[in-house]
Image (spheres, grey):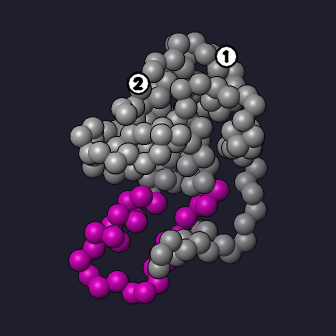
Amino acid sequence: MHYDKVKRDKIDFCNICGKYENLTWDHVPPKCCNNMYPIKVNSWWEGIPEDTNYEKNYQNGIRYRSLCSECNSKLGAKYDIVLDKFTKDLTRIIESSIVLPSIIKIPVEINKLCKAICGHILAAKNFYDKENLIDLKLREYVLREIAVHLKRCHYCIGSIYIRQS
């Protein structure tokens, strides 16, 4: 099955703040995430696609008309900057030709990184869902101006450690 491209109305509910306004396009994943490889698109309930005849190159991510301009601007200006830096740091390490140590530390503003990811998860939906508990919790987190206080956190992705700066 192929990805059904559905355009929402230009005026609808924003997937983050819930305001009924003009919607803007959001790229998922955002342009800063090194989107240069073909990706397969499938809905969650269809499972992982097995045939490869519908790969498509989405260099700027898949566009969803799902966010008001205020939320899209906030996501881009406040949170995607951290996602961009993290993506570039991680890409530089992965593509390096040098022998890497067993532990690599990448300082990151973890709340902003998480809010960028959660914001784009919310954006990647062609409708506003006011009853989905996951969406409600993600919205609450992304909209909250106060960061969740995390002291000296370290996260591990394989052998790459992410340290909150």
Q: Nearer the viewer, residue 90 or 159?
A: 159
Q: Place residue 55 in its image quadrant.
A: top left
Q: Is residue 104 left or right of residue 73?
A: left
**In the rendered structure, does residue 64 fall within the stretch colored magenta?**
no
Residue beneath disc 1 = 20
Structural crowding at the residue carrying mark 2, measured as other residues with C-alpha within 10 Å and reported as few (<14), some (14–19) or many (≥20)? few
The residue drawn where x is 56% and y is 47% is 116
Residue beneath disc 2 = 5
Magenta residue span = 86-111
Q: Is residue 94 left or right of residue 123?
A: left
Q: Nearer the viewer, residue 157 or 106?
A: 157
The location of residue 50, given as percent across then percent down, is 34, 48
Q: Is residue 31 visible?
A: no
Badge 2 or badge 1: first in the primary sequence:
2
Asked whether the beta carbons under mark 2 and mark 1 sit within 8 Å of each other, the answer is no
Q: Place residue 149 in its image quadrant.
A: bottom right
